[in-house]
Amino acid sequence: YALEQDLRGALHNDEFELRYQPQIDAASGRVSGAEALLRWNNPARGMISPALFVPVLESAGMIEEVGLWALNAACREAGKWHRLGKGPLSVAVNVSAHQLDRADLQTLIKRTLERHALRPGMLEIELTESAAAADIGRAERLFEALHGLGIPIAIDDFGTGFSSLSALRALAFDKIKIDRQFVTEVETRRDSQAICQSIIALARGLGIRVLAEGVERQEEYWWLRRHGCSDFQGYYFSPPLRGAAFQTFVRNHA
Ligand code: G
Ligand code: G
Ligand code: MN
Ligand code: NA
């Protein structure tokens, strides 16, 4: 249909952009990096959210190509960040379940790192819990390959994906991202508190980091920090920014 037609020309017409949302390490209070978030800026339609067009890219078989474009653009940008002199800054890139279909995904990722002379530890691959659960075998192979290359993995939208604990145990990953719905008003909601506490305990037991997404208020930040959450992202700190604005944010941040 029409959206799909417009998307077919988008890559060629250079209509995709990336925004970078800062991530904060609570222990140091410093910016540890950013999540790269895709935007589609179409002359007729305006700026469109990936929540609307990523599913279309997936069903139309275009996510692979656009996903690689995003990976390359994010790595190119992150390659500039060492010049800020604020310590290492990593970039997190979202990978769709459909991209797992390609057996050589890890090779493409490795080549992209080399192209931009980026150390493997400076890239992080985000896969949603539901994408990992949909094909545990494929996720397991990808995660092993990425670990072999030294690239960290984050499980996105954690708590929304119907994955079993045995499925999770089969996977080796480095970070859990607590879904925004459990973060909103966590300081007053007993149900969200119970869920966040158990996710944080799980991460600690596994010896991995745990990031709260969609933090909008100081109360949410304080509650989660007090209960052991290690990393933060959300409008309370910053919305997703253009590359240049992210660099300014890092320069001005403690
Ligand atoms: O930034 P925003 O909240 O509009 O993003 C909406 C959704 O789109 C999020 O769930 C996010 O994970 C997803 N998304 C953003 N960028 C990418 C991308 O580069 N690739 C894929 N597959 N999903 C993305
Ligand atoms: O990949 P993921 O689904 O986690 O993407 C996060 C999405 O949530 C992005 O589209 C981003 O723009 C959006 N987002 C980031 N911070 C906040 C926030 O504090 N509040 C809300 N409502 N949305 C946020
Ligand atoms: Mn994400
Ligand atoms: Na998420």
Image (tube, grey):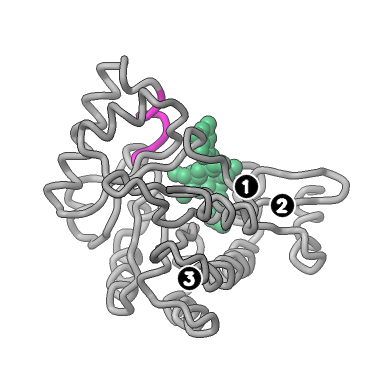
- Please tell me which residue lies in front, 250 or 50: 250
Mark 2–mark 1 Cα distance, whole angstroms, equals 7 Å
Amino acid under disc 1 = Pro
Mark 2 in CB contact with mark 1 (< 8 angstroms): yes
Q: Tell whether 134 sits left or right of 148.
A: right
Reading the image, the residue beneath label 3 is 82
N-terminal-most mark, 3 or 2: 2
Instruction: Please give the name of the residue rendered at 34% of the width and 40% of the height, measured from the top-left corner.
Output: 178
* In the image: residue 10, left or right of residue 97: right
Vertical placement of 18 versus 227: above or below?
A: below
Going 25% across and 24% down the picture, which residue do you hit? 193
Instruction: From the viewer's side, name the closer residue of 177 and 60.
Output: 177
Nearest-to-viewer mark from 3 and 1: 3
Secondary element at image label 1 = helix
The residue under label 1 is 50
Identity, as a three-letter code, of the amino acid under mark 3: His
- Checking the image for residue 123, the label placed there is none
Q: Is residue 183 magenta?
A: yes
Neighbours of disc 1 within 10 Å: few (<14), some (14-19), many (20+): some
Q: Label 2: which residue?
A: 40
Which residue is rendered at x = 27% and y = 35% of the image? 225
| Magenta-colored span | 177-184
> Taking the image as drawn, is residue 95 in sight?
no
